[in-house]
Amino acid sequence: MKSRATLPKTCIALGLPDSKRLLEQACREADAGERFLEFRLDYLPRPEQGLAVIRDFLRLYPEATLLATCRRHQNHGRFNGSIEEEFGILGEAVKAGAKAVDIEIESAETPLAHREFLDAKTFVVVSYHNFEGTPAMEPIMRRMMKVPADAYKIVTTARKPSDNLRVLALGRAYPKVPLILLAMTEVGFPTRVLSTVMGGLYTYAAPTATEGTAAGQVTARTLHHLYRIEKPIKEPRFFGVIADPVRHSISPAVHNRALQARRFPGLYLPFLVSPLQLKDFFVLADGLPLAGFSVTIPHKQRIIRYLDSIDPLTRRIGAVNTVFRKAGKWRGTNTDADGIRVPLQRRLKIAKSSILVAGNGGSARSAAFSLADAGARLSVTGRNPDRVRALAKICGADPLTPEQAAERHFDALIHATPLGMWPHTEECFFPGAIPADLVFDLVYTPHDTLLLRRAAEQGKAVIHGLEMFLEQAAHQFQIFTGESAPKAVMERAALEALAEQLSISNHAAHNHSGQPHR
Protein backbone atom coordinates (compact mmCIF):
# COMPACT_ATOMS: atom_id res chain seq x y z
CA MET A 1 0.00 0.00 0.00
CA LYS A 2 3.04 2.29 0.12
CA SER A 3 3.00 2.78 -3.65
CA ARG A 4 1.33 6.02 -4.76
CA ALA A 5 0.39 4.36 -8.05
CA THR A 6 -2.13 2.14 -6.26
CA LEU A 7 -4.30 5.08 -5.20
CA PRO A 8 -7.19 6.20 -7.43
CA LYS A 9 -7.39 9.91 -8.19
CA THR A 10 -10.63 10.36 -6.25
CA CYS A 11 -11.33 9.67 -2.59
CA ILE A 12 -14.97 9.70 -1.46
CA ALA A 13 -15.33 11.37 1.94
CA LEU A 14 -17.93 9.63 4.11
CA GLY A 15 -18.86 11.08 7.46
CA LEU A 16 -22.14 9.84 8.91
CA PRO A 17 -23.41 9.82 12.51
CA ASP A 18 -24.71 6.26 12.27
CA SER A 19 -22.70 3.09 11.54
CA LYS A 20 -25.55 1.45 9.61
CA ARG A 21 -25.88 4.47 7.31
CA LEU A 22 -22.10 4.60 6.90
CA LEU A 23 -22.03 1.00 5.66
CA GLU A 24 -25.00 1.56 3.35
CA GLN A 25 -23.46 4.68 1.81
CA ALA A 26 -20.07 3.00 1.40
CA CYS A 27 -21.70 0.06 -0.36
CA ARG A 28 -23.54 2.41 -2.71
CA GLU A 29 -20.27 4.08 -3.61
CA ALA A 30 -18.56 0.74 -4.22
CA ASP A 31 -21.47 -0.43 -6.36
CA ALA A 32 -21.04 2.77 -8.40
CA GLY A 33 -17.43 1.80 -9.06
CA GLU A 34 -15.62 3.83 -6.39
CA ARG A 35 -12.67 2.03 -4.85
CA PHE A 36 -11.09 4.65 -2.57
CA LEU A 37 -13.14 5.82 0.41
CA GLU A 38 -12.46 7.79 3.56
CA PHE A 39 -14.29 6.75 6.74
CA ARG A 40 -14.54 9.70 9.12
CA LEU A 41 -14.74 7.68 12.31
CA ASP A 42 -14.98 10.84 14.40
CA TYR A 43 -18.50 11.42 13.01
CA LEU A 44 -19.79 8.37 14.82
CA PRO A 45 -21.02 8.73 18.45
CA ARG A 46 -18.27 6.28 19.39
CA PRO A 47 -15.53 6.00 16.72
CA GLU A 48 -14.88 2.36 17.60
CA GLN A 49 -18.31 1.58 16.10
CA GLY A 50 -16.69 2.12 12.72
CA LEU A 51 -14.34 -0.83 13.15
CA ALA A 52 -17.10 -3.34 12.51
CA VAL A 53 -18.20 -1.29 9.50
CA ILE A 54 -14.68 -1.48 8.07
CA ARG A 55 -14.59 -5.25 8.48
CA ASP A 56 -18.08 -5.75 7.04
CA PHE A 57 -17.42 -3.46 4.10
CA LEU A 58 -14.10 -5.07 3.18
CA ARG A 59 -15.64 -8.54 3.31
CA LEU A 60 -18.03 -7.34 0.60
CA TYR A 61 -15.47 -5.28 -1.35
CA PRO A 62 -12.01 -6.66 -0.60
CA GLU A 63 -10.44 -4.75 -3.50
CA ALA A 64 -11.42 -1.36 -2.01
CA THR A 65 -8.94 0.93 -0.25
CA LEU A 66 -10.11 2.52 2.98
CA LEU A 67 -8.62 5.65 4.53
CA ALA A 68 -9.43 5.98 8.24
CA THR A 69 -9.64 9.39 9.89
CA CYS A 70 -10.48 10.25 13.49
CA ARG A 71 -10.00 14.00 13.69
CA ARG A 72 -10.04 15.58 17.11
CA HIS A 73 -12.42 18.37 18.07
CA GLN A 74 -9.48 20.74 18.61
CA ASN A 75 -8.61 20.29 14.92
CA HIS A 76 -12.14 20.84 13.57
CA GLY A 77 -13.10 17.18 13.91
CA ARG A 78 -15.71 15.63 16.19
CA PHE A 79 -13.63 13.33 18.38
CA ASN A 80 -13.32 14.58 21.96
CA GLY A 81 -10.72 12.05 23.10
CA SER A 82 -6.98 12.44 23.62
CA ILE A 83 -4.25 12.10 21.03
CA GLU A 84 -3.34 8.70 22.47
CA GLU A 85 -6.97 7.58 22.10
CA GLU A 86 -7.06 8.89 18.54
CA PHE A 87 -4.01 6.82 17.64
CA GLY A 88 -5.46 3.80 19.41
CA ILE A 89 -8.61 3.99 17.27
CA LEU A 90 -6.60 4.42 14.08
CA GLY A 91 -4.45 1.44 15.05
CA GLU A 92 -7.56 -0.70 15.45
CA ALA A 93 -8.84 0.59 12.10
CA VAL A 94 -5.65 -0.66 10.46
CA LYS A 95 -6.09 -4.07 12.10
CA ALA A 96 -9.67 -4.09 10.79
CA GLY A 97 -8.39 -3.61 7.24
CA ALA A 98 -7.90 0.11 6.60
CA LYS A 99 -4.83 0.52 4.42
CA ALA A 100 -4.36 4.24 4.97
CA VAL A 101 -4.75 6.70 7.83
CA ASP A 102 -5.03 10.48 7.93
CA ILE A 103 -3.36 12.13 10.92
CA GLU A 104 -3.59 15.87 11.45
CA ILE A 105 -0.24 17.58 11.84
CA GLU A 106 -1.07 18.71 15.38
CA SER A 107 -1.26 15.06 16.46
CA ALA A 108 1.51 13.75 14.23
CA GLU A 109 4.19 16.12 15.49
CA THR A 110 3.58 15.61 19.21
CA PRO A 111 5.82 13.24 21.19
CA LEU A 112 2.63 11.77 22.72
CA ALA A 113 1.74 10.15 19.42
CA HIS A 114 2.11 6.36 19.49
CA ARG A 115 2.84 5.03 16.02
CA GLU A 116 3.47 1.37 16.57
CA PHE A 117 0.59 0.56 14.18
CA LEU A 118 2.20 2.54 11.34
CA ASP A 119 3.98 -0.45 9.87
CA ALA A 120 5.14 -0.96 6.30
CA LYS A 121 1.61 -1.81 5.12
CA THR A 122 0.00 1.40 6.32
CA PHE A 123 -0.07 4.47 4.09
CA VAL A 124 0.22 7.53 6.33
CA VAL A 125 -1.18 10.88 5.28
CA VAL A 126 -0.25 13.83 7.49
CA SER A 127 -2.72 16.66 7.02
CA TYR A 128 -2.83 20.40 7.61
CA HIS A 129 -6.09 22.36 7.58
CA ASN A 130 -6.59 26.09 7.71
CA PHE A 131 -10.25 27.11 8.05
CA GLU A 132 -9.54 30.84 8.04
CA GLY A 133 -7.62 31.51 4.85
CA THR A 134 -4.62 30.63 2.69
CA PRO A 135 -1.37 31.73 4.35
CA ALA A 136 2.15 31.58 2.95
CA MET A 137 2.78 27.98 1.96
CA GLU A 138 6.53 27.59 2.46
CA PRO A 139 6.47 27.71 6.29
CA ILE A 140 3.68 25.12 6.27
CA MET A 141 5.67 22.80 4.01
CA ARG A 142 8.75 23.11 6.21
CA ARG A 143 6.64 22.20 9.23
CA MET A 144 5.03 19.24 7.45
CA MET A 145 8.27 17.80 6.09
CA LYS A 146 9.68 17.44 9.60
CA VAL A 147 7.18 14.63 10.21
CA PRO A 148 7.79 11.33 8.35
CA ALA A 149 4.82 10.37 6.18
CA ASP A 150 3.93 8.75 2.86
CA ALA A 151 1.95 11.78 1.70
CA TYR A 152 1.17 15.28 2.90
CA LYS A 153 -2.25 16.91 2.64
CA ILE A 154 -2.58 20.70 2.74
CA VAL A 155 -6.10 22.11 2.80
CA THR A 156 -6.71 25.84 3.10
CA THR A 157 -9.70 28.18 2.76
CA ALA A 158 -9.79 30.19 -0.47
CA ARG A 159 -10.92 33.78 0.03
CA LYS A 160 -9.82 35.11 -3.36
CA PRO A 161 -9.02 33.54 -6.77
CA SER A 162 -5.24 33.73 -6.42
CA ASP A 163 -5.43 31.51 -3.32
CA ASN A 164 -5.95 28.62 -5.76
CA LEU A 165 -2.61 29.36 -7.36
CA ARG A 166 -0.84 29.64 -4.01
CA VAL A 167 -1.98 26.14 -3.10
CA LEU A 168 -1.46 24.52 -6.51
CA ALA A 169 2.02 26.02 -6.86
CA LEU A 170 3.26 23.62 -4.17
CA GLY A 171 2.89 20.78 -6.68
CA ARG A 172 5.38 22.48 -8.97
CA ALA A 173 7.68 23.49 -6.14
CA TYR A 174 7.82 19.94 -4.70
CA PRO A 175 7.39 17.61 -7.71
CA LYS A 176 8.89 14.59 -5.91
CA VAL A 177 6.80 14.92 -2.73
CA PRO A 178 3.41 13.13 -2.72
CA LEU A 179 0.93 15.95 -2.04
CA ILE A 180 -2.83 16.33 -1.72
CA LEU A 181 -3.59 20.01 -2.32
CA LEU A 182 -7.03 21.55 -1.90
CA ALA A 183 -8.67 24.87 -1.12
CA MET A 184 -12.11 24.89 0.49
CA THR A 185 -15.06 27.17 -0.43
CA GLU A 186 -16.55 27.63 -3.87
CA VAL A 187 -13.75 30.07 -4.72
CA GLY A 188 -11.35 27.16 -4.25
CA PHE A 189 -13.22 24.77 -6.53
CA PRO A 190 -10.54 24.83 -9.28
CA THR A 191 -8.14 23.03 -6.94
CA ARG A 192 -10.58 20.08 -6.79
CA VAL A 193 -9.91 19.42 -10.46
CA LEU A 194 -6.46 20.85 -11.09
CA SER A 195 -4.66 19.36 -8.09
CA THR A 196 -4.39 15.94 -9.73
CA VAL A 197 -3.86 17.41 -13.20
CA MET A 198 -0.89 19.34 -11.81
CA GLY A 199 0.69 16.37 -10.06
CA GLY A 200 -1.32 15.95 -6.87
CA LEU A 201 -1.84 12.46 -5.49
CA TYR A 202 -5.64 12.49 -5.31
CA THR A 203 -8.60 14.76 -4.64
CA TYR A 204 -11.71 14.47 -2.49
CA ALA A 205 -15.26 14.17 -3.79
CA ALA A 206 -18.77 14.03 -2.44
CA PRO A 207 -20.71 10.77 -2.62
CA THR A 208 -22.08 10.07 -6.08
CA ALA A 209 -25.48 11.57 -6.90
CA THR A 210 -25.57 13.86 -3.87
CA GLU A 211 -24.55 17.42 -3.15
CA GLY A 212 -21.02 18.31 -2.14
CA THR A 213 -19.96 17.78 1.45
CA ALA A 214 -18.44 21.25 1.63
CA ALA A 215 -18.54 24.44 -0.37
CA GLY A 216 -16.57 23.85 -3.56
CA GLN A 217 -16.79 20.06 -3.42
CA VAL A 218 -18.57 18.19 -6.20
CA THR A 219 -19.59 14.62 -6.77
CA ALA A 220 -17.25 11.90 -7.92
CA ARG A 221 -19.43 11.48 -10.98
CA THR A 222 -18.71 15.08 -12.01
CA LEU A 223 -14.98 14.64 -11.53
CA HIS A 224 -14.97 11.38 -13.49
CA HIS A 225 -17.26 12.22 -16.39
CA LEU A 226 -17.10 15.99 -16.81
CA TYR A 227 -13.47 16.65 -15.92
CA ARG A 228 -12.09 13.12 -16.49
CA ILE A 229 -9.43 13.53 -13.84
CA GLU A 230 -8.53 9.85 -14.09
CA LYS A 231 -7.23 10.43 -17.62
CA PRO A 232 -4.00 12.42 -17.66
CA ILE A 233 -3.82 15.22 -20.22
CA LYS A 234 -0.43 16.01 -21.65
CA GLU A 235 0.21 19.76 -21.60
CA PRO A 236 -3.46 20.74 -21.12
CA ARG A 237 -4.80 24.17 -22.01
CA PHE A 238 -7.04 25.72 -19.39
CA PHE A 239 -10.23 27.70 -20.03
CA GLY A 240 -13.06 28.84 -17.81
CA VAL A 241 -15.96 31.11 -16.98
CA ILE A 242 -15.87 33.93 -14.43
CA ALA A 243 -19.09 34.99 -12.71
CA ASP A 244 -20.72 35.78 -9.38
CA PRO A 245 -22.59 33.54 -8.78
CA VAL A 246 -21.09 30.83 -10.98
CA ARG A 247 -22.50 27.57 -9.61
CA HIS A 248 -25.56 27.73 -11.88
CA SER A 249 -23.44 28.02 -15.05
CA ILE A 250 -23.71 25.16 -17.53
CA SER A 251 -20.69 26.45 -19.46
CA PRO A 252 -18.28 23.89 -17.90
CA ALA A 253 -20.57 21.01 -18.91
CA VAL A 254 -20.98 22.32 -22.45
CA HIS A 255 -17.39 23.32 -23.15
CA ASN A 256 -15.78 20.25 -21.56
CA ARG A 257 -17.99 17.95 -23.61
CA ALA A 258 -17.05 19.93 -26.71
CA LEU A 259 -13.34 19.67 -25.88
CA GLN A 260 -13.72 15.92 -25.41
CA ALA A 261 -15.63 15.55 -28.68
CA ARG A 262 -12.84 17.30 -30.55
CA ARG A 263 -10.16 15.42 -28.57
CA PHE A 264 -8.70 18.78 -27.63
CA PRO A 265 -6.26 18.65 -24.67
CA GLY A 266 -8.03 21.11 -22.43
CA LEU A 267 -10.15 21.69 -19.34
CA TYR A 268 -12.84 24.33 -18.77
CA LEU A 269 -13.50 25.39 -15.17
CA PRO A 270 -15.90 27.66 -13.26
CA PHE A 271 -14.26 30.52 -11.35
CA LEU A 272 -16.22 32.36 -8.67
CA VAL A 273 -14.98 35.96 -8.87
CA SER A 274 -16.58 38.78 -6.91
CA PRO A 275 -16.75 42.28 -8.46
CA LEU A 276 -13.86 43.45 -6.27
CA GLN A 277 -11.62 40.50 -7.18
CA LEU A 278 -11.19 40.92 -10.94
CA LYS A 279 -7.63 42.19 -10.62
CA ASP A 280 -6.75 39.30 -8.32
CA PHE A 281 -8.29 36.85 -10.79
CA PHE A 282 -5.74 37.87 -13.40
CA VAL A 283 -2.99 36.77 -11.00
CA LEU A 284 -4.52 33.30 -11.14
CA ALA A 285 -5.14 33.50 -14.90
CA ASP A 286 -1.52 34.41 -15.60
CA GLY A 287 -0.18 31.77 -13.23
CA LEU A 288 -2.10 28.70 -14.44
CA PRO A 289 -1.99 29.92 -17.27
CA LEU A 290 -5.45 30.28 -18.80
CA ALA A 291 -5.71 30.37 -22.59
CA GLY A 292 -9.13 32.05 -22.50
CA PHE A 293 -12.32 32.45 -20.50
CA SER A 294 -15.99 33.37 -20.76
CA VAL A 295 -17.29 36.41 -18.89
CA THR A 296 -20.78 36.79 -17.49
CA ILE A 297 -22.71 38.63 -14.75
CA PRO A 298 -21.50 40.94 -13.24
CA HIS A 299 -18.17 41.40 -15.04
CA LYS A 300 -18.94 42.08 -18.71
CA GLN A 301 -18.31 45.82 -18.51
CA ARG A 302 -15.80 46.07 -15.67
CA ILE A 303 -13.47 43.46 -17.28
CA ILE A 304 -12.54 45.90 -20.07
CA ARG A 305 -10.17 47.90 -17.87
CA TYR A 306 -7.98 44.81 -17.36
CA LEU A 307 -7.63 43.88 -21.05
CA ASP A 308 -4.87 44.86 -23.46
CA SER A 309 -7.21 45.28 -26.44
CA ILE A 310 -10.80 44.79 -27.65
CA ASP A 311 -12.26 44.86 -31.16
CA PRO A 312 -14.18 47.94 -32.44
CA LEU A 313 -17.72 46.51 -32.16
CA THR A 314 -17.05 45.28 -28.64
CA ARG A 315 -15.74 48.74 -27.72
CA ARG A 316 -18.98 50.29 -29.01
CA ILE A 317 -21.04 47.76 -27.05
CA GLY A 318 -18.95 48.39 -23.96
CA ALA A 319 -19.28 44.80 -22.78
CA VAL A 320 -17.03 41.74 -23.16
CA ASN A 321 -18.14 38.13 -22.79
CA THR A 322 -15.06 36.41 -24.25
CA VAL A 323 -11.41 36.89 -23.30
CA PHE A 324 -8.51 35.11 -24.95
CA ARG A 325 -4.74 35.28 -24.82
CA LYS A 326 -2.85 36.00 -28.03
CA ALA A 327 0.84 36.86 -28.32
CA GLY A 328 0.97 37.19 -24.54
CA LYS A 329 -1.81 39.81 -24.48
CA TRP A 330 -5.33 39.61 -23.06
CA ARG A 331 -7.87 40.41 -25.77
CA GLY A 332 -11.62 40.80 -25.47
CA THR A 333 -14.55 40.33 -27.82
CA ASN A 334 -18.31 39.86 -27.66
CA THR A 335 -20.06 36.77 -28.99
CA ASP A 336 -23.34 37.66 -27.27
CA ALA A 337 -24.27 39.94 -30.16
CA ASP A 338 -24.38 37.05 -32.64
CA GLY A 339 -25.96 34.86 -29.98
CA ILE A 340 -28.92 37.26 -29.90
CA ARG A 341 -29.11 38.30 -33.54
CA VAL A 342 -28.90 34.85 -35.18
CA PRO A 343 -31.78 33.15 -33.28
CA LEU A 344 -33.94 36.25 -33.74
CA GLN A 345 -33.43 36.51 -37.50
CA ARG A 346 -34.56 32.90 -37.86
CA ARG A 347 -38.03 34.07 -36.74
CA LEU A 348 -38.44 37.56 -38.19
CA LYS A 349 -36.84 40.16 -40.40
CA ILE A 350 -34.98 42.33 -37.95
CA ALA A 351 -34.82 45.36 -40.24
CA LYS A 352 -37.80 47.65 -39.54
CA SER A 353 -39.16 45.32 -36.81
CA SER A 354 -40.14 46.97 -33.54
CA ILE A 355 -38.05 45.41 -30.78
CA LEU A 356 -38.03 46.15 -27.06
CA VAL A 357 -34.87 45.43 -25.05
CA ALA A 358 -35.46 45.08 -21.31
CA GLY A 359 -32.28 45.71 -19.35
CA ASN A 360 -29.20 47.92 -19.41
CA GLY A 361 -26.30 45.61 -18.52
CA GLY A 362 -23.79 43.83 -20.72
CA SER A 363 -26.25 41.49 -22.46
CA ALA A 364 -28.75 44.31 -23.02
CA ARG A 365 -26.03 46.43 -24.60
CA SER A 366 -25.04 43.54 -26.88
CA ALA A 367 -28.66 43.18 -27.98
CA ALA A 368 -29.21 46.91 -28.47
CA PHE A 369 -26.14 47.54 -30.63
CA SER A 370 -26.51 44.34 -32.63
CA LEU A 371 -30.17 44.96 -33.43
CA ALA A 372 -29.71 48.68 -34.09
CA ASP A 373 -26.97 47.84 -36.60
CA ALA A 374 -29.38 45.38 -38.24
CA GLY A 375 -31.95 48.14 -38.76
CA ALA A 376 -34.50 47.41 -36.01
CA ARG A 377 -36.82 50.09 -34.62
CA LEU A 378 -35.49 49.85 -31.10
CA SER A 379 -36.84 50.71 -27.66
CA VAL A 380 -35.08 50.18 -24.32
CA THR A 381 -36.61 49.80 -20.88
CA GLY A 382 -35.37 48.93 -17.42
CA ARG A 383 -35.57 49.76 -13.75
CA ASN A 384 -32.78 52.34 -13.78
CA PRO A 385 -34.09 55.32 -15.80
CA ASP A 386 -30.71 57.05 -16.07
CA ARG A 387 -28.97 53.98 -17.47
CA VAL A 388 -31.88 53.28 -19.82
CA ARG A 389 -31.68 56.82 -21.24
CA ALA A 390 -27.88 56.57 -21.61
CA LEU A 391 -28.08 53.27 -23.50
CA ALA A 392 -30.97 54.46 -25.67
CA LYS A 393 -29.08 57.62 -26.62
CA ILE A 394 -25.89 55.91 -27.81
CA CYS A 395 -27.70 53.27 -29.90
CA GLY A 396 -30.51 55.46 -31.27
CA ALA A 397 -33.33 53.80 -29.34
CA ASP A 398 -36.47 55.08 -27.65
CA PRO A 399 -36.12 55.09 -23.82
CA LEU A 400 -39.19 53.83 -21.96
CA THR A 401 -40.15 53.23 -18.36
CA PRO A 402 -41.49 49.72 -17.64
CA GLU A 403 -44.98 51.21 -17.35
CA GLN A 404 -44.65 52.94 -20.74
CA ALA A 405 -43.32 49.75 -22.33
CA ALA A 406 -46.26 47.74 -20.99
CA GLU A 407 -48.69 50.08 -22.77
CA ARG A 408 -47.00 49.69 -26.18
CA HIS A 409 -46.82 46.71 -28.53
CA PHE A 410 -43.70 45.29 -30.19
CA ASP A 411 -42.83 42.61 -32.71
CA ALA A 412 -40.29 41.15 -30.26
CA LEU A 413 -39.09 41.49 -26.68
CA ILE A 414 -35.50 40.74 -25.68
CA HIS A 415 -35.38 40.19 -21.92
CA ALA A 416 -31.82 40.87 -20.75
CA THR A 417 -32.09 41.26 -16.97
CA PRO A 418 -31.29 38.63 -14.28
CA LEU A 419 -34.95 38.50 -13.19
CA GLY A 420 -36.14 34.91 -13.18
CA MET A 421 -32.64 33.47 -13.10
CA TRP A 422 -31.88 30.62 -10.68
CA PRO A 423 -32.27 30.69 -7.70
CA HIS A 424 -34.83 33.55 -7.92
CA THR A 425 -36.99 31.71 -10.41
CA GLU A 426 -40.32 33.29 -9.42
CA GLU A 427 -39.35 36.80 -10.50
CA CYS A 428 -40.60 38.28 -13.76
CA PHE A 429 -40.01 41.65 -15.45
CA PHE A 430 -43.60 41.81 -16.75
CA PRO A 431 -46.10 40.74 -14.07
CA GLY A 432 -49.07 41.18 -16.41
CA ALA A 433 -49.55 41.21 -20.17
CA ILE A 434 -46.33 40.92 -22.17
CA PRO A 435 -46.24 43.62 -24.88
CA ALA A 436 -44.72 41.61 -27.75
CA ASP A 437 -45.59 38.84 -30.21
CA LEU A 438 -42.21 37.10 -29.82
CA VAL A 439 -40.50 36.79 -26.42
CA PHE A 440 -36.76 36.02 -26.26
CA ASP A 441 -35.53 35.49 -22.68
CA LEU A 442 -31.74 35.50 -22.42
CA VAL A 443 -31.96 33.76 -19.02
CA TYR A 444 -31.32 30.05 -19.56
CA THR A 445 -31.41 28.73 -15.99
CA PRO A 446 -34.09 27.53 -15.63
CA HIS A 447 -34.88 26.51 -19.20
CA ASP A 448 -38.55 27.51 -18.87
CA THR A 449 -38.46 30.82 -17.02
CA LEU A 450 -41.57 32.36 -15.51
CA LEU A 451 -41.50 34.99 -18.28
CA LEU A 452 -41.52 32.32 -21.00
CA ARG A 453 -44.24 30.32 -19.25
CA ARG A 454 -46.43 33.42 -19.04
CA ALA A 455 -45.66 34.29 -22.67
CA ALA A 456 -46.75 30.82 -23.81
CA GLU A 457 -49.96 31.11 -21.78
CA GLN A 458 -50.65 34.43 -23.53
CA GLY A 459 -50.18 32.84 -26.94
CA LYS A 460 -46.80 34.38 -27.68
CA ALA A 461 -44.00 32.75 -29.64
CA VAL A 462 -40.93 32.18 -27.46
CA ILE A 463 -37.19 31.73 -27.80
CA HIS A 464 -35.41 30.05 -24.90
CA GLY A 465 -32.22 31.56 -23.56
CA LEU A 466 -30.46 28.28 -24.24
CA GLU A 467 -30.53 29.04 -27.96
CA MET A 468 -28.64 32.28 -27.43
CA PHE A 469 -26.26 30.56 -25.00
CA LEU A 470 -25.38 27.82 -27.50
CA GLU A 471 -24.87 30.25 -30.38
CA GLN A 472 -22.43 32.41 -28.43
CA ALA A 473 -20.73 29.39 -26.83
CA ALA A 474 -20.05 27.82 -30.24
CA HIS A 475 -18.38 31.05 -31.34
CA GLN A 476 -16.35 31.11 -28.12
CA PHE A 477 -15.20 27.53 -28.64
CA GLN A 478 -13.85 28.42 -32.06
CA ILE A 479 -12.01 31.44 -30.64
CA PHE A 480 -10.54 29.38 -27.79
CA THR A 481 -9.45 26.32 -29.78
CA GLY A 482 -9.30 27.33 -33.45
CA GLU A 483 -11.59 24.40 -34.25
CA SER A 484 -15.23 24.23 -35.32
CA ALA A 485 -17.70 23.74 -32.50
CA PRO A 486 -19.54 20.38 -32.22
CA LYS A 487 -22.93 22.09 -31.87
CA ALA A 488 -25.02 18.94 -31.49
CA VAL A 489 -22.75 17.70 -28.69
CA MET A 490 -22.92 21.07 -26.96
CA GLU A 491 -26.72 21.16 -27.13
CA ARG A 492 -27.04 17.66 -25.64
CA ALA A 493 -24.60 18.58 -22.87
CA ALA A 494 -26.55 21.77 -22.10
CA LEU A 495 -29.89 19.98 -21.86
CA GLU A 496 -28.41 17.25 -19.66
CA ALA A 497 -26.77 19.85 -17.40
CA LEU A 498 -30.01 21.77 -16.98
CA ALA A 499 -31.89 18.57 -16.18
CA GLU A 500 -29.26 17.55 -13.64
CA GLN A 501 -29.28 21.03 -12.13
CA LEU A 502 -33.03 20.78 -11.63
CA SER A 503 -32.67 17.31 -10.11
CA ILE A 504 -29.98 18.47 -7.66
CA SER A 505 -32.08 21.49 -6.65
CA ASN A 506 -35.05 19.25 -5.95
CA HIS A 507 -32.85 16.80 -4.04
CA ALA A 508 -31.34 19.59 -1.94
CA ALA A 509 -34.77 20.85 -1.03
CA HIS A 510 -35.72 17.48 0.45
CA ASN A 511 -32.42 16.25 1.86
CA HIS A 512 -29.83 17.69 4.23
CA SER A 513 -26.42 16.06 4.20
CA GLY A 514 -24.42 15.39 7.37
CA GLN A 515 -21.11 15.00 5.56
CA PRO A 516 -17.75 16.29 6.77
CA HIS A 517 -16.02 19.38 5.50
CA ARG A 518 -12.85 18.67 3.59
Image: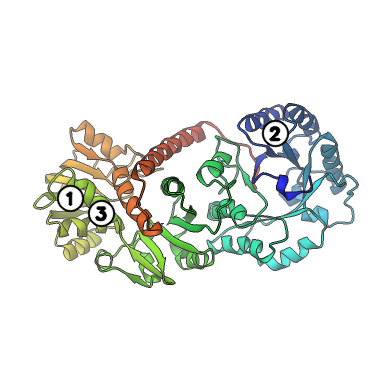
Q: Quadrant of residue 362?
A: bottom left
The disc, 2 or 1, on the residue closer to the chain's N-terminal end is 2
Identify residue for label 3: 338
Q: Is residue 384 visible?
A: no
Name which residue type carries label 2.
Answer: Pro
- Please tell me which residue is depicted at 65% across the width and 48% down the height of the picture: 518
Q: Measure the C-alpha gap from mark 1 to mark 3.
A: 17 Å
The disc, 2 or 3, on the residue closer to the chain's N-terminal end is 2
Left or right: residue 257 versus residue 9 is left
Identify residue for label 2: 17
Name which residue type carries label 1.
Answer: Leu
- Please tell me which residue is depicted at 11% across the width and 50% down the height of the picture: 354
Q: Residues within 10 Å of mark 2 (few under 14, many from 20)?
A: some
- Please tell me which residue is depicted at 74% across the width and 39% down the height of the picture: 66
Identify residue for label 1: 356
Up-down: is 210 above or below 324? above
Tell me whether circle 2 and circle 1 mark residues in contact (CB < 8 Å).
no
Left or right: residue 282 versus residue 113 is left
The image position of residue 413, as x and y in percent, is 19, 46
The image position of residue 250, as x and y in percent, is 42, 45
Q: Which element carries disc 3, helix, strand or loop?
A: helix
Label number found at residue 301: none
